[in-house]
Amino acid sequence: MNENELIDLALNQPLAADEFKPVDLHIDRRAGLTIEWKDGKTSRFDLGYLRKMCPCAQCRVEREKPMAAKKPAAVGTSLTVLPSNIDKATTFDDAKLVGNYAISIVWGDGHKTGIYDFRYLRLICPTHGDSTIGK
């Protein structure tokens, strides 16, 4: 399943399920994002991984392009093709909660349109993956 299909799958999950409710979030410039979920599991995300998996429309379109059609990435594009300013693209300037369902990250290169729904984060968790969805 590709990244864009994972986004669609995640958004079709019940938001009220305990597995999608964080009880603690911590974002660190070195360690990345750590989420403790209401069901007792913990997810850890490297910042480079989160940027590559950005769910915004611009990044989704970029990921759908055939590899041959991709230009070297510029500021504000996804990390499917790594940008020359990779250091800034994988650091964050700010992060805020969006209601009680998501976190928004402003990346060091100015990219700020990705809203990471908690259902999506749980689904893409490198530790748990989609094996936790719907169980």
Image (cartoon, rainbow, N blue to C red):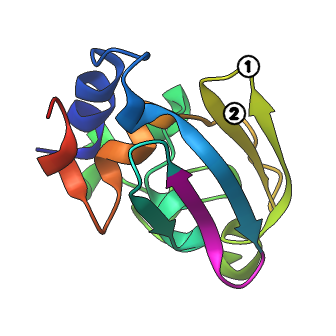
| Foreground: disc 2 or disc 1 | 1
Q: Name the amino acid type tagged 2.
A: Thr
Q: Residue at x 53, y 74 (%)?
A: 46
- Is residue 79 in view from this perspective? no
Q: Residue at x 16, y 29 (%)?
A: 134
Q: Residue at x 63, y 73 (%)?
A: 32
114 shown above or below 82: above
Q: Position of residue 80 (x, y in %)?
A: 39, 61
Query: Which residue is label 1 attached to?
Result: 99
Q: Position of residue 112 (x, y in %)?
A: 76, 41
Q: Residue at x 35, y 58 (%)?
A: 125
44 shown above or below 100: below
Q: Position of residue 69 (x, y in %)?
A: 30, 49
Label 2 CA crowd tier, 10 Å (few <14, some 14–19, many 20+): some
Q: Position of residue 28 (x, y in %)?
A: 76, 73
Q: Secondary structure at mark 2?
A: loop
- Residues 41 and 15: in front is 41
Q: Is residue 35 magenta?
A: yes
Q: Secondary structure at mark 1?
A: loop
Q: CA distance from mark 2 to mark 1?
A: 16 Å
Q: Which residues are magenta?
A: 29-36
Q: Which mark is residue 113?
A: 2
Q: In terms of image quadrants, where is residue 92?
A: bottom right
Q: Name the amino acid type tagged 1.
A: Gly
